[in-house]
Amino acid sequence: MAIDRLSALISGLMPRLSLRCAGDPDGLAQAARGDGSGLVVHLLVAGTMSFGDERGESALVAPAVVVLRNDVEHRLAKMRDGVSLMSAEIAFDGPAGEVLVQAFTHPVVAGLESAGADLAHLLALIRGELAEPRCGRQALLARAGEILLITVLRHLVARPGSAAGILRALADERIARAVVAIHEQPAAAWSLESLAERAGMSRTAFAQRFRDEMGKPPGSYLAGLRLAIAERSIGRGEGLKRAARAAGYRSPAALSRALGRRRGSPVELGKGVL
């Protein structure tokens, strides 16, 4: 049975999008120097530009998209006239934001010439709005940018090997079942056995495959997500007890210890719950 690989992740993002460029870029376009907690998206809808980072230079031919962390130094420059570009910075207020940003340790550059119908329609909408500004343009492009993020994530998940972290894990059908379950019910009493059962794999094979795809053990991933949920709950003034319950900690004391220690060592899931 097919699963929805993205909805649970997306519901935990809570993106806030700020447009940086809409139309003809004036000279060199660079990302703002952020703190690494958000993403920058450059959508080239017409023309040709060069993209460069520490790994070198490459040419972008429309339609193409570049997604990278907001603290990555890079260069975008027109190669000839007739360029139309939409650039935006995306911050995340939800607990899954950090998880998604970690998937873009290196910039992802993707050509969209073979994009599906959903992305093709969105590109046509954005292209038309950039070519002929009308009332409500900023608001429309901001909403389009949020939809663009979803369609780009679809594009990457459908192409194994094109991204890292959670997007690579979601491209693996078996591991995706476990990842989706974690995001749908992060406070559930997950064990390594129960997650492996969701994936339809043995405990050992699942643990190794999860680490290979996600870059960390299942326990570390679940612990990080739960801590992010708890931190946001506390940030809303809900108190330690409610935060612990929402995030799946066994007690406020357990949450307090998690908040106080560094998350440098991996957390292993055994037969018991986390």
Image (tube, grey):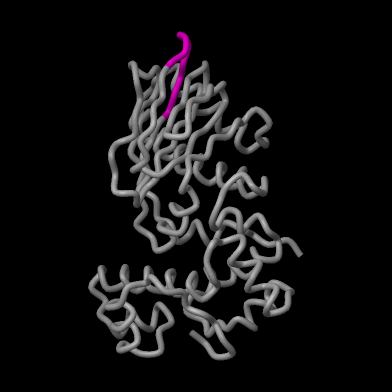
Q: Residue at the location (27% across, 78% down)?
A: 260
- Determine whether 210 is above or below 204 in the image: above
Image location of residue 122, percent across then percent down: 56, 33
- Determine whether 149 is above or below 111 in the image: below
Assign the N terminus to one quadrant of the image.
bottom right
Q: Outermost residue, right direction?
A: 1
Image location of residue 33, percent across then percent down: 28, 39
Q: Which is more toward the observer, 247 or 79?
A: 79
Is 33 left or right of 94, judged from the image as shown?
A: left
Question: The magenta stretch spans which residues?
Answer: 78-86
Is 4 left or right of 142, judged from the image as shown?
A: right
Q: Which is more toward the observer, 55 or 1?
A: 55
Is 251 left or right of 167, judged from the image as shown?
A: left
Image location of residue 182, percent across then percent down: 54, 72
Query: In the figure, residue 21 lies in which quadrant?
Result: top left
Does residue 185 show up magenta in the picture? Answer: no
Query: In the figure, residue 3 lies in which quadrant?
Result: bottom right
- Determine whether 242 is above or below 105 in the image: below
Q: Outermost residue, left direction?
A: 237
Q: Residue at the location (34% across, 20% down)?
A: 28
Q: Outermost residue, top direction?
A: 81
